[in-house]
Amino acid sequence: MMIIPNIAVTDMKTSVDFYMNVFGFTYEFGLLDNHDMVPVEQVANSIFTLLKHGDSELMLQTRQNLSDELPNLDFKMTTQSWGTIYFRNGDVDAVHQRALAGDFDILKSPFKQWYGMYEIYLKDPDGHIICVGERSGDTP
């Protein structure tokens, strides 16, 4: 089984730029509401986008489109996220520098965890909490 997060976003271009520029994801494709594919230059019009980083994938879907797809969901805008998307084997210091350069919301600067991971926490443009970790010693 493969787990691929699909996160709701309010501004597709802003989110795509964030994940590509800070984490190094690449653009695979974006879809319009009629399911036509769009190049990255037109991603602002996309309702769904697939990004890749090595073998990992991340799906971004507009809040409105997800709301339309799941009409029984009480999909209210919130600035509070109660989960974390964890990217393992990332380059924490590089992510930190790119986040600083882009003036993104860093929740916790790089630090070493007791379980042997070097990590950084930040928020994406929609408030989703992202943690990037790399092995930095022995794990229990």
Image (cartoon, rainbow, N blue to C red):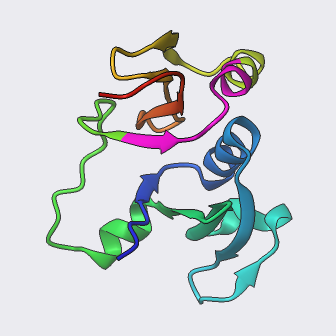
Q: Position of residue 24 (x, y in %)?
A: 74, 45
The residue sitting at 51% across, 31% down in the picture is 133
- Is 108 placed left or right of 42 in the picture? left
- Is 134 placed left or right of 108 in the picture? right
Q: Position of residue 19 (x, y in %)?
A: 65, 45
Q: Position of residue 125 (x, y in %)?
A: 54, 35
Inspect the magenta stretch and tell me whether residue 128 lies in it. Answer: no
Question: Which residue is at the front of the view, 4 or 103?
Answer: 4
The range drawn in magenta is: 85-96
Inspect the magenta stretch and tell me whether residue 93 lies in it. Answer: yes
- Is 125 placed left or right of 45 in the picture? left
Q: Which quadrant of the structure image shows residue 21?
A: top right
Q: Quadrant of the N terminus?
A: bottom left
- Is 127 placed left or right of 51 in the picture? left
The residue sitting at 14% across, 71% down in the picture is 72
The residue sitting at 48% across, 51% down in the picture is 9
Q: Is residue 20 above or below residue 57?
A: above
Q: Is residue 65 above or below residue 101?
A: below
Question: Which residue is at the front of the view, 49 or 24?
Answer: 24
The residue sitting at 52% across, 30% down in the picture is 135
Q: Quadrant of the C terminus?
A: top left
